[in-house]
């Protein structure tokens, strides 16, 4: 296989990939008002499968796919495509895009914890403190709705819980992506996990498609669906898989900050949502957690700026 890209290039790919994810998370909100969730996810996987049909073939340098890789591909699609889509789409339909962004900002903390228990990577005391701070922010966001904070009346506790469930799914996706990129190209991984997503979602999508009036969907909604499909399954996945090849899993989670920042900004600038004191405090907690996790990277960056692999 070709040697990994220099670290700075890997970081750029990770940031771009997560920015694309944040944009489609926020823009999925108007789509959930047009399409039922399962049908929306099924159409996404179907359109993406057509766009990536050439990516499913073996790429130069790909290793044969054995039973272990098959299980990893299935699990990555189950968590990162199927379950993430269901939790995220149902969640964002019941809460605001800006609140979704705040909750998504906890991904680095969750990735750090999973890296410790799944990959046996060392997690510093700062990372554990970051987890605690992130939980404080989430608790504040949840309690603010119950106390009647202005601007949060539309926010659903169940919706926020579903967004956090999607955080856990995305974190598993981050961990698995590091393992898969050791033997498969980013393009082929993107295509194969999308195909698994299509298989998993087809029964539910067909069930909701039976009574759906496709003729009532506007041209703008179809256009937004096309962007959502390509961004979610094709562009963001390829960018992330390309970047993660050069970055340790525990540190790649730090760059998911681009996802919540983009989602929150779209909520504020496009949908006109209010950036309340509760959201501001929760977002500050999330940023503090991210900085705590990123601190070790800055401290030993001189030794890992451009990793070398045999």
Image (cartoon, rainbow, N blue to C red):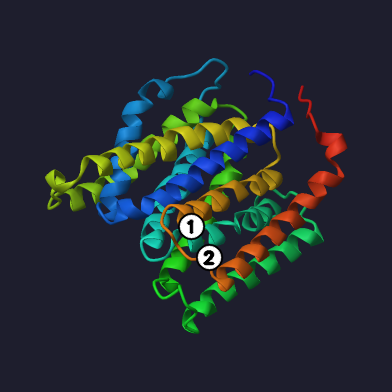
Q: Residue at x 49, y 26 (%)?
A: 187
Question: How many neighbours does mark 1 have within 10 angstroms: few (below 14), some (14-19), or many (20 or more)?
Answer: some
Whole-percent x and y of residue 172?
56, 50
Of residue 233 and residue 248, the one placed in the foreground of this image is 233
Question: How many neighbours does mark 2 have within 10 angstroms: few (below 14), some (14-19), or many (20 or more)?
Answer: some
| Residue 56 located left or right of residue 140 | left
Assign the C terminus to one quadrant of the image. Answer: top right
Whole-percent x and y of residue 280?
60, 67
The disc placed on residue 97 is none
Q: Residue furthest bottom?
A: 147
Residue 95 seen in this snapshot: yes
| Residue 86 located left or right of residue 105 | left
Position of residue 180 relative to residue 34, above or below, is above
Q: Residue at x 76, y 25 (%)?
A: 309
Position of residue 32 relative to residue 191, above or below, is below
Residue 65 seen in this snapshot: no
Q: Look at the numbered disc 1 and give the secondary structure of its residue.
A: helix
The reply to whether discs 2 and 1 touch (Cβ–Cβ < 8 Å) is yes
Assign the N terminus to one quadrant of the image. Answer: top right
Whole-percent x and y of residue 306?
79, 29
Q: Residue furthest top?
A: 60
Q: Look at the numbered disc 2 and give the secondary structure of its residue.
A: loop
Whole-percent x and y of residue 13?
61, 33
Mark 2–mark 1 distance (CA, rounded to whole Å): 7 Å
The residue carrying mark 1 is 268
Position of residue 154 relative to residue 191, above or below, is below
Position of residue 51 relative to residue 215, above or below, is above
The number of discs equals: 2
* Mark toward the start of the polypeptide (2 vs 1): 1
The residue carrying mark 2 is 275
Q: Residue at x 55, y 26 (%)?
A: 184
């Amino acid at each position: 296989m070709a040697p990994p890209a220099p670290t700075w290039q890997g970081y750029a790919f990770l940031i771009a990939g997560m920015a694309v994810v944040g944009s489609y998370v926020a823009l999925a909100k108007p789509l959930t008002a047009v399409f039922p969730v399962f049908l929306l996810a099924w159409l996404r996987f179907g359109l993406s499968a057509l766009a990536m049909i050439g990516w499913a073939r073996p790429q130069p340098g790909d290793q044969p796919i054995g039973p272990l890789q098959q299980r990893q591909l299935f699990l990555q699609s189950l968590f990162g495509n199927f379950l993430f889509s269901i939790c995220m789409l149902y969640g964002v339909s019941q809460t605001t895009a800006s609140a979704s962004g705040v909750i998504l900002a906890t991904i680095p903390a969750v990735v750090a914890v999973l890296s410790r228990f799944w990959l046996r990577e060392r997690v510093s005391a700062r990372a554990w403190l970051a987890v605690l701070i992130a939980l404080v922010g989430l608790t504040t966001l949840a309690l603010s709705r119950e106390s009647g904070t202005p601007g949060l009346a539309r926010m659903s506790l169940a919706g926020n819980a579903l967004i956090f469930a999607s955080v856990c799914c995305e974190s598993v996706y981050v961990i698995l992506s590091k393992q898969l990129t050791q033997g498969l190209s980013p393009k082929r991984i993107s295509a194969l996990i999308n195909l698994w997503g299509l298989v998993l979602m087809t029964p539910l999508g067909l069930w909701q498609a039976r009574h759906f009036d496709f003729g009532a969907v506007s041209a703008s909604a179809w256009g937004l669906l096309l962007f959502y499909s390509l961004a979610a399954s094709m562009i963001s996945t390829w960018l992330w898989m390309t970047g993660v090849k050069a970055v340790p899993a525990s540190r790649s989670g730090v760059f998911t900050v681009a996802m919540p920042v983009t989602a929150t900004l779209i909520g504020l600038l496009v949908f006109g949502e209010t950036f309340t004191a509760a959201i501001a405090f929760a977002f500050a907690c999330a940023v503090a957690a991210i900085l705590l996790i990123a601190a070790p990277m800055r401290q030993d960056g001189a030794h890992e700026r451009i990793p070398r692999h045999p």
